[in-house]
């Protein structure tokens, strides 16, 4: 029987889940995997949460050094999030020759490559299954099997909060009330700005790029758009177009070129991600021999995410090199400006004769081929009316220029949005 002594830093949602699962399933884990997971110490800001979980006072500390420096502990589980204290904890954990398990996507996106190099050199594990897709067995299955094939692309709904908000808005709920429901249900970040503005998804895209392509991107070079500008009208028009709007994080390689992006996209019914609703996450991975596969499940939540952390703890006895991050590839990271797609553009146009014509003349100027124009007949008595224009395949940079020109000219309000179709 192998014994793993762990210290948990952070008793928030995932920490609580981890504590509950380890305690309730200790003997079944022992039977199935021949491993005994022992919680030696837990750390949080104060004893409140530990008391709620009936954790004895002698197991509690509010000083993480008492965990990272404790010689009885083999593995530190970091569940506090962020990239400041969490980075110090990661560094110290490796310095004190302990394995490091985390659910922290921002930490792995920003420092995964460096931490992994240090860990591998010291024959230690750096594990982060819970950082992308929450409870979905994703990163370890990429490392253990999918990577055998050449991964060509991934497309994912990687943020439960955004997906929940978009699903509820499509049914008529307001943005803010959908967001507060997501907060109450516990899957929104402490600061939900990171969910809404796309950065949570971007961190996950960086981790996926590391795993799928062996490339560690600079997050600043990735095009990141969130769902702040999505209006209820967009979801209604999307429905008329037999589409849904989803926040998509994606990565795709073509020869030496790599494109990485996070933005809302219009998905058609035949897209496997079309029916992924509410807080669910899903990732489509396309690889050479396997073809497309999809992973689907809860991307957040106490028990699913804690389950992913436990799978890391169970894997601590595997060969280090098979688990280490393999960053070696160099790609030419493409700029979104050069990408081409069909687009959905929504303007709020001044409700006066000739304004729409002036806007469409800009499309002619930029040689952008209009496919459809939709004006909602129910909202024509306002000063500015929503008008949607869909285009044939066009270059992002040209449409972007067109949009700023239209804004500057005062033909519309500034809240226009352009959303690519995912084909
Ligand atoms: N805030 C994240 C989400 C939690 O909504 O998906 C999981 O990373």
Image (tube, grey):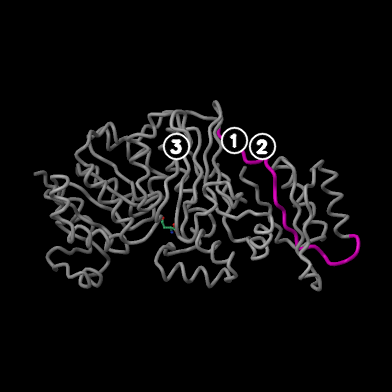
Q: Residue at x 21, y 51 (%)?
A: 68
SS under mark 2: helix
* Picture quadrant of ligand 1: bottom left
* Label 2 environment density (alpha carbons within 10 Å; few <14, some 14–19, many ≥20): few
The image quarter containing residue 51 is bottom left
| Proximity of marks 1 and 2: CB atoms separated by less than 8 Å | yes
Which residue position is annotated with label 2?
A: 338
> How many numbered markers are drawn?
3
> Which residue of the protein is positioned furthest toward the right in this rendering?
353
**Disc 1 within 8 angstroms of ligand 1 (CB):** no
Give the magenta-colored segment's residue range: 333-354
Q: Is residue 280 above or below residue 47?
A: above
Locate residue 42, reporting x and y percent: 20, 60
Q: Residue at x 54, y 62 (%)?
A: 167
* Label 3 environment density (alpha carbons within 10 Å; few <14, some 14–19, many ≥20): many
Q: Is residue 314 above or below residue 374?
A: above
Looking at marks 3 and 1 on the same chain, the residue that comes earlier in the sequence is marked by: 3
The image quarter containing residue 11 is bottom left
Query: Seen in the image, is 6 located left or right of residue 275?
Result: left
SS under mark 1: loop
Of 393 and 125, nearer the camera is: 393
Q: Residue at x 19, y 41 (%)?
A: 97
SS under mark 3: loop
Locate residue 351, reporting x and y percent: 84, 67
- Say whether residue 210 is magenta: no
Looking at marks 2 and 3 on the same chain, the residue that comes earlier in the sequence is marked by: 3
Which residue position is annotated with label 3?
A: 216
Q: Is residue 245 above or below residue 328?
A: below
Query: Seen in the image, is 218 located left or right of residue 379?
Result: left
Locate residue 355, reporting x and y percent: 87, 60
Image quarter where the C terminus lies is: top right
Which residue position is annotated with label 1?
A: 334
């Amino acid at each position: 029987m192998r014994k793993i002594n762990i210290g948990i830093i952070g008793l928030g949602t995932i920490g609580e889940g981890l504590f509950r699962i380890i305690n309730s399933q200790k003997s079944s884990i022992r039977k199935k995997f021949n491993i005994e997971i022992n919680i030696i110490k837990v750390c949080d800001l104060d004893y409140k949460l530990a008391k709620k979980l009936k954790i004895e006072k002698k197991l509690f500390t509010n000083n993480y050094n008492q965990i990272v420096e404790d010689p009885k502990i083999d593995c530190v589980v970091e569940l506090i999030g962020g990239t400041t204290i969490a980075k110090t904890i990661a560094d110290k954990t490796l310095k004190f020759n302990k394995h490091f398990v985390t659910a922290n996507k921002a930490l792995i996106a920003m420092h995964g490559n460096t931490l992994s190099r240090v860990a591998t050199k010291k024959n230690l594990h750096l594990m982060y299954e819970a950082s992308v897709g929450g409870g979905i067995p994703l990163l370890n299955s990429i490392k253990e099997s999918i990577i055998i094939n050449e991964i060509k692309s991934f497309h994912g709904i990687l943020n439960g909060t955004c997906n929940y908000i978009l699903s509820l808005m499509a049914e008529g709920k307001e943005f803010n009330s959908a967001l507060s429901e997501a907060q109450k249900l516990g899957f929104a970040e402490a600061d939900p700005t990171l969910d809404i503005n796309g950065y949570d998804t971007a961190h996950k895209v960086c981790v996926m790029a590391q795993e799928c392509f062996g490339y560690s991107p600079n997050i600043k070079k990735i095009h990141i758009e969130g769902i702040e500008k999505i209006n209820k009208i967009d979801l209604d028009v999307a429905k008329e177009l037999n589409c849904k709007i989803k926040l998509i994080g994606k990565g795709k390689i073509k020869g030496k070129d790599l494109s990485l992006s996070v933005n809302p996209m219009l998905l058609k019914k035949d897209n496997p991600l079309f029916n992924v609703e509410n807080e669910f996450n899903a990732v489509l991975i396309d690889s050479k021999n396997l073809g497309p596969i999809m992973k689907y499940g809860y991307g957040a939540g106490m028990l699913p995410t804690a389950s992913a952390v436990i799978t890391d703890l169970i894997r601590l006895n595997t060969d280090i090199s098979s688990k280490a991050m393999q960053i070696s590839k160099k790609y030419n990271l493409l700029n979104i400006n050069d990408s081409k797609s069909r687009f959905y553009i929504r303007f709020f146009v001044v409700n006066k004769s000739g304004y729409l014509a002036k806007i469409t003349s800009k499309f002619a100027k930029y040689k952008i081929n209009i496919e459809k124009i939709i004006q909602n007949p129910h909202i024509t008595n306002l000063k500015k009316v929503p008008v949607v224009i869909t285009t044939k395949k066009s270059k992002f940079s040209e449409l972007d220029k067109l949009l700023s020109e239209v804004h500057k000219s005062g033909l519309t309000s500034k809240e226009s949005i352009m959303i690519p179709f995912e084909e």
